[in-house]
Image (spheres, grey):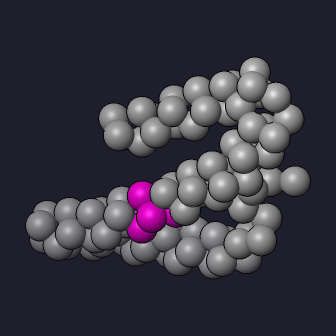
């Protein structure tokens, strides 16, 4: 079971909201909206995606990493490395 299962509905609701934001940004481009206004909306969508990412990461650590640590040191090391790699990707993006 995924670590975010308990929050799945909340994540889906947030992602649908972000999806709507992105569609709105596309409409803004189609309508030749002022560049800065579009960039403001892109920033808002980016922040919303970052919030989802951080929540998923927190759930991953609280559930998947903790479960792996209970299983074995090797499993824990693998999950910690996986989480660290995910954090590095998020920081670079």
- Expressed as whole percent of the image width and height from the top left, the position of residue 41 reads 28, 70
Predominant SS of the magenta segment: helix
Q: Name the foreground residue: 55 vs 64.
A: 64
Does residue 30 appear in this view? no
Image-based side of 35 in relation to 93, left or right: left
**The quadrant where residue 59 appears:** bottom right
Using the image, determine if residue 72 lies above or below residue 55: above
Residue 49 figure quarter? bottom left
Q: How many marks?
A: 0
Residue at 43% in and 73% down: 21
Magenta stretch holds residue 51: yes
- Measured as percent of width and height from the top left, residue 58 is found at 57, 56
Q: Is residue 26 above or below residue 56?
A: below
Q: Is residue 88 left or right of residue 9?
A: left
Q: Which one is in front, 36 or 32?
A: 36
Can residue 11 be seen at all in this image of the molecule? yes
Q: Split into 4 quadrants, where in the image is the C terminus?
A: top left
Name the residue at the top extreme.
Answer: 74
Up-down: is 13 above or below 86? Answer: below
Q: Which residues are magenta?
A: 48-52
Quadrant hosting residue 70 = top right
Q: In the image, what residue occupies the spot 36% across and 59% down?
A: 46
Q: Is residue 50 magenta?
A: yes
Residue ID at (75%, 25%): 73
- Depicted 86 relative to depicted 28: above or below: above
Residue situated in front as seen by the camera: 52 or 16? 52
* Residue 36: percent from left, percent from top: 12, 67
* Residue 82 horizontal side relative to residue 38, left or right: right
Tell me which residue sits at (75%, 38%) in the image: 69
x and y, in percent, of residue 56 in the image: 60, 57
């Amino acid at each position: 079971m995924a670590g975010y299962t308990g929050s799945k509905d909340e994540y889906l609701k947030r992602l649908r909201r972000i999806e709507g934001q992105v569609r709105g940004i596309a409409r803004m481009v189609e309508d030749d909206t002022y560049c800065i206004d579009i960039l403001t909306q892109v920033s808002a969508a980016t922040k919303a995606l970052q919030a989802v990412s951080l929540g998923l990461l927190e759930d991953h650590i609280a559930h998947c990493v903790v479960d792996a640590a209970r299983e074995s040191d090797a499993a824990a090391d693998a999950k910690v490395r996986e989480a660290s790699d995910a954090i590095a990707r998020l920081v670079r993006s």
